[in-house]
Image (cartoon, helix red, strand yellow):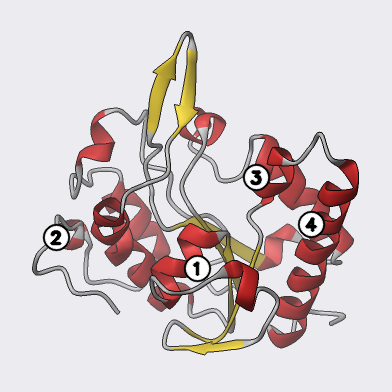
């Protein structure tokens, strides 16, 4: 899935195991790239160890970094509403990010998110590979462009392939959709925000059907 020969990499820190708990503990000591230096902690994936559906986003945000949990900030609120609208219970879903440390720059007293570089994504990808092997989901949902490109290739475009059932070595089925934070960026345009929310919900519902979640 990835070739680490020319890049910084977390691979030496990733244990040879299919235990999510062992992976999570080991990730706390990862020094595979420089992002750990400014992050509060590693924010690893969370959810059932054999979840049929896995959601993969970009990286932790400010609140996720502080709390060590996934999707607990404003984007998490959007995701929770979308999952509920799609009829998906969170305890059937494993949620993670392709980058496990929060990348940010200071702006006054605030910590402002920065999009991770390709080298940083590649460095962290062995953790995602290990998570996918451990959980073995039927379906992976890529939330946003960064996650989709990390898993599907640099040429992948959300605008062209969102909401389609895709085949991938990562899982039997992959679906790409908007990152919940995309809705926050258009909050001052309610019709656009509603349209994105409806598309996100529709895509999650599609993924749930292919993951054969209860009631789908």
Which residue is situated farthest in the left direction here? 5
**Mark identifier at residue 148:** 1
C-alpha gap between disc 1 and disc 2: 20 Å
Q: Is residue 78 above or below residue 102?
A: below
C-alpha gap between disc 4 and disc 3: 11 Å
Question: Regarding mark 2 in the picture, which secondary structure is present there?
Answer: loop
For this view, does 93 lie left or right of residue 41? right
Residue 116 picture location, percent across and down = 36, 47
Q: What residue is rendered at 63% in x and 38% in y?
A: 72
Residue matched to label 4: 196
Dot 4 or dot 1: first in sequence order is 1
| Residue 73 visible in rendering | yes
C-alpha gap between disc 2 and disc 3: 28 Å
**Mark identifier at residue 181:** 3
Report the front residue among 16 and 145.
145
Question: Regarding mark 4 in the picture, which secondary structure is present there?
Answer: helix
C-alpha gap between disc 4 and disc 1: 17 Å
């Amino acid at each position: 899935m990835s070739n680490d020969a020319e890049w910084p990499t977390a691979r030496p820190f990733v244990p040879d195991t299919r235990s999510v708990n062992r992976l999570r503990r080991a990730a706390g000591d990862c020094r595979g790239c420089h992002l750990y230096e400014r992050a509060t902690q590693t924010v690893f994936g969370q959810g059932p160890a054999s979840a049929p559906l896995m959601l993969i986003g970009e990286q932790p945000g400010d609140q996720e970094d502080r709390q060590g949990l996934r999707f607990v900030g404003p984007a998490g609120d959007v995701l929770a509403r979308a999952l509920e609208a799609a009829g998906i219970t969170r305890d059937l879903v494993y949620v993670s990010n392709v980058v496990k440390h929060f990348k940010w720059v200071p702006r006054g007293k605030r910590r402002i998110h920065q999009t991770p570089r390709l080298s940083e994504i590649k460095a962290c990808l062995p953790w995602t590979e290990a998570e996918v092997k451990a959980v073995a989901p039927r379906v992976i949902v890529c939330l946003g462009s960064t996650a989709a490109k990390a898993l599907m290739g640099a040429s992948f475009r959300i605008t062209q392939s969102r909401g389609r059932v895709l085949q991938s070595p990562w899982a039997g089925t992959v679906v790409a959709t908007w990152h919940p934070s995309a809705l926050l960026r258009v909050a001052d345009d309610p019709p656009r925000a509603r349209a994105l929310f409806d598309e996100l919900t529709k895509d999650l519902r599609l993924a749930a059907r292919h993951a054969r979640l209860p009631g789908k």
